[in-house]
Amino acid sequence: MAPQSKRSDAPDISYGKRSDAPDPTGTRADARRNRARILDAAREAVLAEGTDASLRAIARRAGVGVGTLYRHFPTREELIKELVRESFHALAARAGGLDAQTPPLDALAAWLADFARATTMYQGLPASLMATVADESSPLNRACQDMRQAGAALLRRAQDDGVIRGDIDGTDLFALASAIGWAAEQTADPDARRARLLRVVLEGLVERRQAPER
């Protein structure tokens, strides 16, 4: 059967080289840039002010309209969820990089400092989001598990090297680091308090080799 001819009243959707043709590539690139700016601004705001940070202030800091923010993240929870997911991925990647290039004790100390600071973002999360993190079928849970496994690998490497006590496991490590992050945020100078508490905890984790008998 011969193909039917195009109806003369059909809409013209072939823009060809017309100057008024939309540029989907450029539009997508702008959208990606706006999304990245929103996440950067939101990350700074949440770390400074907590999860109740003003969305309007976040949009202003990102240099976009509040409508643009809502197009990317229709609710506050969606925005916070993406921040948490990115944080999990960044911590997992950070652990992988440290594992390859840094002495075991230094790698563990650096990663714990990053994790303790990141816990600021996890405090005050809504119950629904905490439930998503705990849901083993959710992508957020998988990202969290990847992060925890990467951190635990740094711990095992330090233990295998004989510099960290062997009776500590990943659950202990994350509980300690989370407690440090929470305690630091209760002070006027959280960065200084966090660094001090990390030093105290690491001194307690370091393997104390007995001096040889004379």
Image (tube, rainbow, N blue to C red):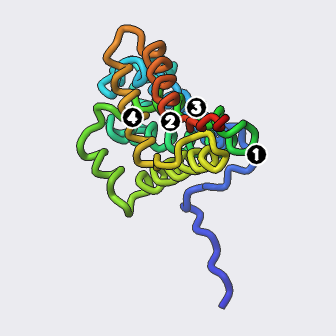
The answer to whether one can see residue 56 in this image is no
Nearer the observer, disc 4 or disc 2?
2
Q: Earlier in the sequence, mark 4 or mark 1?
A: 1
Location of residue 111 by image quarter: top right
Q: Give the position of the C terminus as an image quadrant.
A: top right
Residue 34 vs residue 54, the one in the foreground: 54
Nearer the observer, disc 4 or disc 1?
4
Residue holding disc 4:
178
Contact check, label 1 and label 3, Cβ < 8 Å: no
Residue holding disc 1:
17
Contact check, label 1 and label 2, Cβ < 8 Å: no
The circle drawn on residue 108 is none
Percent from the top left, x then y, of residue 176? Answer: 40, 35
Residue at 74% across / 44% down in the picture? 100
What's under tag 4, amino acid-wise? Answer: Ser
Residue holding disc 2:
205
* Secondary structure of the residue carrying numbered label 4: helix
Q: Residues within 10 Å of mark 2 (few under 14, many from 20)?
A: some
* Secondary structure of the residue carrying numbered label 3: helix
Residue 53 vs residue 199, the one in the foreground: 199
Nearer the observer, disc 3 or disc 2?
2
* Secondary structure of the residue carrying numbered label 2: helix
- Cα separation, mark 3 vs mark 2, equals 11 Å
